Amino acid sequence: MDEVKAIFEPKSAILIGSSTLREKVGMTSPQLFKDVIYNMKKFFHGKTYIFDVDASDRSLNELPEVSELAVVMLPPEQSIFMVEKCAQIGVKAIVIITGGYKDFQREKLVKIRERFGVRILGPNTIMGVINTANGLNTTFEKGVMPKKGNIAVISQSGGVGACILDWACYYNVGISKFAFMGDKIDVDDVELLQYFGKDKQTKVICLYMEGIKNGRAFIETARKIVKEKPIIALKGGITKESAHRAKSHTASMAGTDEIFDAALRKAGIIRVENVEELMDAAVALSKQPPMRGDNIAIVSNVGGPAILAGDAVARSNLKLAALTEETKRKIESSYPGVDATNPIDMIADARADRYAKVLELVLSDKNVDGVVIINMLKSCFFEPKDAKIIPKIAKKYPNKPVVDVPAGGEDFALVYKVLGNTNIPLYNLPEKAVKALKVLRAYGKIVEKH
Amino acid sequence: MDEVKAIFEPKSAILIGSSTLREKVGMTSPQLFKDVIYNMKKFFHGKTYIFDVDASDRSLNELPEVSELAVVMLPPEQSIFMVEKCAQIGVKAIVIITGGYKDFQREKLVKIRERFGVRILGPNTIMGVINTANGLNTTFEKGVMPKKGNIAVISQSGGVGACILDWACYYNVGISKFAFMGDKIDVDDVELLQYFGKDKQTKVICLYMEGIKNGRAFIETARKIVKEKPIIALKGGITKESAHRAKSHTASMAGTDEIFDAALRKAGIIRVENVEELMDAAVALSKQPPMRGDNIAIVSNVGGPAILAGDAVARSNLKLAALTEETKRKIESSYPGVDATNPIDMIADARADRYAKVLELVLSDKNVDGVVIINMLKSCFFEPKDAKIIPKIAKKYPNKPVVDVPAGGEDFALVYKVLGNTNIPLYNLPEKAVKALKVLRAYGKIVEKH
């Protein structure tokens, strides 16, 4: 555990690369080395040492002995050589960026790990690690750093992890820590889950996996964590063909998809089908409470999108809440012309006051477990500032999740400016908001069961 | 037909509203009137007349007799009165923006239509019509106009239509014409399909529907059109509960979802499940040829997203193309370290030259019917300008669809700047690109069959 901690929370780090070497096919390049140096110097709060293996005035004896963490970005044989040197001088943990390792080379790394007790993340992590709390950032994406938040990401794949990172930065998703596992010859999902399970900055854990090595330990570890923190998983390699790619990609043996699915269910992990669903689910879980029942109310200023939300509820095996007669009467007597049958179309001229009143009535209805709000701007009189009442009303009902849909493109962007930093998750389509409530319901059931 | 043409292609239009009247719940408002006037003055190439029913210096005799089209935005009774006046003086077509009509009021409109032969779109269209060719824009979204293109949209719902419009504007989707049908007491899907079927500016037709009134005519009309132009439909109201909302929303009787689904299949219409899928499908169909077989090749600079694309192919009942030995040998001999088994991971340092060569080899492979390209920037050496080779190679193979995935947020935006105006459709996730090819395959089968 301590050594895994050294991967994310070192006081100092040494970056080992080459200022001249470039692989013909592969990631070793002077530019990559330069960019990792740039990011570490720019973001990392601790001390960063640079070790250029091709600098004429350097010798291996100059490796600073103080570092807890070394980041290695050289071709396989040179990396292995440097990993051993680092282990000899007492470096606790090593992140290997570069890939292209053959089986015998991975075995060499395992032997070094066994002999010296040094912990290895990778090889083939491509992007290494990010910790938004101390600024550790071993990626070579110059200047890229997600905003601080409580979502941790573990990705077996550099590419999928990079896609998640790009998504998080662009859509402003708050991240605690990022780990790219690569070939995981040593530190694996189980230890990372254990570490994130205890990490105070982390509230939700996202996983991209291509295979599980130690299924039983994985399930047991996850089962313990999900009582406190939800875990969401995206699995790559569900077919024989894509599994072939996974094997050569990160040396994973993918099992059959059914076995994997059953394992996730047993572990209390929520499964999603793509990166957008992963991020959408993580945002929902990081901002809203689990949903305690199946009954969803839809409060909208447009009819069609409310109908589509209702359809999505049915497709998700959730229920359209049957509002009490009292709720309906109160709504209809206040707004003649509004039919208060769920999904509620409050009509396109609804502004903040109508939203506030109807939302309050719906949230206080005992038949309602969660609410999808739809507030379009186009074709409506609603203005972005009207959205401010939503978190105000929602926080009075802390056990009922509320999600918001400013459907479309510009409408979403405009309302995001008002609500993006609140606890109300925003989705650009009704179907995605319903999916978010489905995830919150799934986590509600997991918490009840585990 | 001629009168339907008058809805989209009038030489002049008269806008009928009130500068003082505001409904307590409803869309009639001085601001809405003002905003429609603004849009028509700003965009419409023809003459726009304004008729303010509450202007003190106006009398009904002043209604200009020249207009082919009148746009009415008053409460039900006043609208009906004005519709009759317009019909009397020979206005050919009327778009009614406002909603809230009761059955007997809709019947009054039907009678006027029958007596005078005037054609009515609506009531309850909320946004009316847009024609990017002549600038006609009866929406009250001030300054909102989609860019010219070849996708026509027919929406029964103002809200869903507005969401599509917002999406199109924000994501730069080219539109030919927009029709908001509302309660469709007269002009309906069938006539609009007939009109768009013949419209030279329209290549793809998008439909949002809550119900079909004349099923047989709808199916027969669609069957004829889909030989030349694909039709994509999103259906709202698949359950009893959301159908209740559809009934009060646009006075539609929704049938069971199974019947609807069968009707669409018979009509050769491609069904989608949300607005994003609708837009993604429309863009694919407007830019790429139908796919003539099931075999998809994936060409990527990252492993994980390629695996996810492969998974999506399997989930879509498509096939990962088995590349010929010759193709594989040529790729692997050029790029040692690259395993040319589909999905192909060309490794993260692939730039334009490697993409060009591999893409050309894959497209010329007889076992390949369509290609998903994945070119991430983050975690890779690929730069946005490298994407320029993609349309160059793709256009040499005009019968094989090619779609591109700069996965993520910023990566997508950066590559969009390079490829957005080319014929290569872009998707922000591999799964969405595969879905686009699935749609192109579906249209391929429709063209073969019909």
Image (tube, coloured by chain):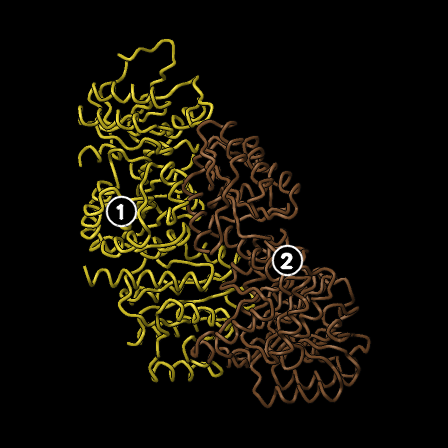
Chain colours: A brown, B yellow
Q: Quadrant of the C terminus of chain B?
A: bottom left
- Give the crowd class for mark 1: few <14, some 14-19, many >=20 residues within 10 Å: many
Type of amino acid under label 2: Pro
Asked if residue A83 shows in the view, the reply is yes
In the rendered image, the vertical position of residue B22 relative to residue B3, given as above or below: above
Residue visible at 59% across and 41% down? Answer: A363
Residue visible at 58% across and 71% down? Answer: A266
Give the residue at mark 1: B202
In the rendered image, the vertical position of residue A296 relative to residue B367, given as above or below: above
Measured as percent of width and height from the top left, residue A19 is found at 65, 75
Q: In this orientation, which residue lies closer to the viewer: A412 or A398? A: A398
Q: Helix or strand or loop: what does disc 1 sit on? A: loop
Q: Is A106 on the left-hand or right-hand side of B390?
A: right
Give the residue at mark 2: A146
Q: Is B60 on the left-hand or right-hand side of A150?
A: left
Asked if residue A412 shows in the view, the reply is no
- Give the crowd class for mark 2: few <14, some 14-19, many >=20 residues within 10 Å: many
**Residues beneath discs 2 and 1 located on the same chain:** no
Measured as percent of width and height from the top left, residue B281 is found at 35, 55
Measured as percent of width and height from the top left, residue A410 is found at 49, 43
Q: In this orientation, which residue lies closer to the viewer: A379 or A140? A: A379
Type of amino acid under label 1: Thr
In the rendered image, the vertical position of residue B36 relative to residue A57, given as above or below: above
